[in-house]
Image: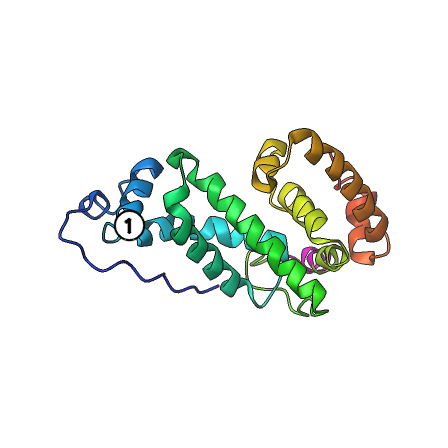
Amino acid sequence: MSLSRPQTPPPLPRTSIVRELRPREEVPDAVLVAEVQRGAPGATTVLFDRYARHVERLVWSLLGPESESEDIMHEVFIRAFEGIHALEDATKLKGWLTGITVYTAREWIRRRTRRRWLRFMDEVPETPHVGASEEVNEATRATYAVLSEMNADDRVLFSLRYIEGLELSEVARACDVSLATVKRRLADVGKRFVNRAKHHEALRPWLEGGRWTTE
């Protein structure tokens, strides 16, 4: 997926820690956030480059092979750059971006569902399954067909836990709910997914072969 970088702020008559570092030197998130907040030249580009792949993976996991994924990613970063002054703990930048991505994806699912536009592409996208077997590609299509029947909240929970592989505590933070709530809702969502997945031939090997687990 190609994605153009967001426009960087106009040059300021101040030096930037981000620009002065050698390209391969990793600027701590806390320093990077401070640089973005003060409008340092190049800081937004560094932040985008660092976390674009993370957001891209999340969007793909939450929405599947959607043609509007690139637009959703842009919306995530626009919201992030507009709201970054409200980020109090800069060390939690990644989790904060995850939360924005989850919120944006949930909004998108609800809009699409209300308008009865929710559908999935016939072709599997290039990412993240480059070189995957046809078995995996068919299972991917079937998985998102099942998820398309879920409401936005259930779909987000399922995708974060079982597709993206986040820890339960990470899912709870991303969805802004308690750990107990996540556990309870995931148990219900997992059962509903399995019941629906049984009707898809491509998912039967995962269900019958022990490759699916809700643990």
Q: Chief secondary structure of the magenta span? A: helix
Q: In which quadrant of the rendered image does the C terminus lie? A: top right
Between residue 95 and residue 27, name the one nearer to us. Answer: 95
Q: Which residue is mark 1?
A: 43
Q: Indicate the quadrant where residue 138 lies.
A: bottom right
Q: Viewed as shown, does residue 29 lie left or right of 144?
A: left
> Residue 199 location in percent, x, y?
86, 56
Above or below, 24 against 149 in this view is above
- Look at label 1 and name its amino acid: Ala
Q: Viewed as shown, does residue 166 lie left or right of 5?
A: right
Q: Viewed as shown, does residue 32 lie left or right of 172?
A: left
Q: Is residue 26 visible?
A: no
Residue at the front extreme, as displayed = 86
Which residue is drawn at the image coordinates 21% and 48% (left, top)?
19
Q: How many marks?
A: 1
Q: Which residues are magenta?
A: 132-140
Which residue is drawn at the image coordinates 45% and 54% (left, top)?
79
